[in-house]
Amino acid sequence: MFTKIKRVYNEYPSAFKVLTLATFIDMLGSFLLYPFYALYITAHFGVGMTEVGILFSIFSAGNIFGGIIGGALADKYGRRVMVIIGLVVSGTGSIFMGLVDDLVLFYVIAGFLGLVGNFGGPARQAMVVDLLPKEKQAEGFGILRIAFNVSASVGPILGGFLATRSFMLLFIADAISSLVTAGIVYLVIPETKPQNLEGKQEESIIKTLKGYKVVLKDGLFVLFLLISAITVLVYMQMNSTLSVFLRDEHGFSAQNFGFLLSMNALIVVFFQFWITRKVSKYAPMKMMAFGTLFYMIGFAMYGFISATYMFFIAMIIITIGEMIVSPVSQAAAASFAPEDKRGRYMAVFSFQWAIPNLFGVILAGIVMESLGPNWVWYFAGILSMFAILGFWLLHGIAKHRFLKEELPLEEEVIIG
């Protein structure tokens, strides 16, 4: 299997390979820290999940505005510089977060990191689309997910080990990984932004920002994002609410939670490429519905089970859904985007993550404290069912966008 992956991987351009390596290094630091945020905040500041939710909301609000600005700047000034800025700010900001003992100041830093740290998010996704032909993009995103999950298989285990000694070590490790990645991008990866067509006038920054109006008028794309946001609202509980739920309700340790997430990542490492090749042959919205079905089953299970081995079985089911949903959604979003607006389309695509993060963890905290912890997972199953129906209906409405050659947006059917 690895020989086949290596052979196919060698078909990709060198810049994409370096981008894959950079993604691995950057995400290694993120997975050392991110899964333990909720545990850190509740322990360090002595607060509950509602306060954790406030942090995620502040961070996500910054992500939304940072993505909007970063996507426009990536289309205007290029991908590479925006990626570097985001990485440097994220790295240095992690150190400050680890040193803060005041919750309000912690919130302020989180908001700033969400804003400036996300400048490079849309640019990085646009790089993949710039570097790869359309028929290779789903596989390319799949390869990035393998790199992403190799780091995720190591990060939580190492993070769980470090967290039992000092949470500050997690912030330092995240900072180092971000700064190393910024150095790699600066030294090795060239600019990938497509050149303007001959005779086409360069857009001003104001006109570039106004280009978001065109993106938001693309009704099919916006509808796709709204339905996708429901799946994200469910999925995000895995890296926020689930750790606290398992600790408080079932005595599941931070170290064991690290093993749970690492198992998730290892499954992706071994099977993501094979699954991506299989599902890329089928209609994307049908595959989104199919993948969300696994979310519905896996997340709902946590509301009914109590045996430790069942926690791992539920995670396996969720992981199968993740391996279908994630690369298909990224490739589908790229298919919607005209070449000169890729950065802005991918910025708006990031809203499917940022907007649920505005209220998702707070809402989960309210549900846990008012209705009971298990209700988080009952609602996760119900929301997944609605998303399945949404994707299935969208297949009938939007399939023409995936069948024909890319046209200027003005020639596409726009609804809403």
Image (spheres, grey):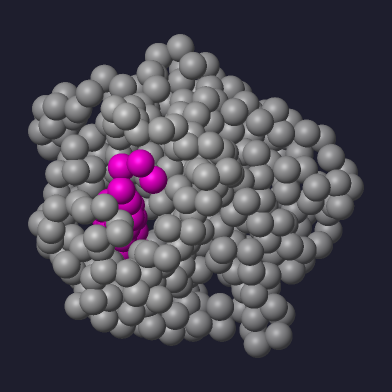
Front position in the image: 328 or 34:
328
The number of callouts visible is 0
Which is nearer the eye, 107 or 393?
A: 393
Vertical comparison of 183 with 253: above or below: above
Query: In this image, 125 relative to 250: left or right?
Result: left
Q: Quadrant of residue 161?
A: top right
Left or right of 273 on screen, residue 252: right
Residue 289 relative to residue 155: left or right: left
Image: 256 above or below 76: below
Residue visible at 71% across and 85% down in the picture = 370
Q: Is residue 410 magenta?
A: no
Q: Residue at x 15, y 44 (%)?
A: 135
Instruction: Give the residue furthest to the top.
Output: 187
Q: Quadrant of the N terminus?
A: top left
Give the main secondary structure of the magenta stretch.
Answer: helix
Q: Is residue 341 visible?
A: yes
Residue 21 against residue 154 in the figure, above or below:
above
Instruction: Please name the residue shown 66% across and 45% down the image.
Output: 115
The answer to whether one can see residue 261 in this image is no
Residue 358 location, quadrant: bottom right
Give yes or no for residue 325 being in the magenta stretch.
yes
Q: Position of residue 315 (x, y in %)?
A: 39, 62
Q: Which residues are magenta?
A: 318-341
Residue 268 rendering spot, x and y as whole percentages: 30, 48
Q: Which quarter of the figure is the C terminus placed in?
A: bottom left
Residue 212 lies, with reference to residue 388, above or below; the image says above
Residue furthest to the right in view is 102
Where is residue 98 drawn, in percent x and y? 76, 37
At a point 64% along the width and 69% down the height, the residue shown is 359
Place of residue 226 in the rendered image (x, y in percent of width and height, measured from the top left): 44, 71
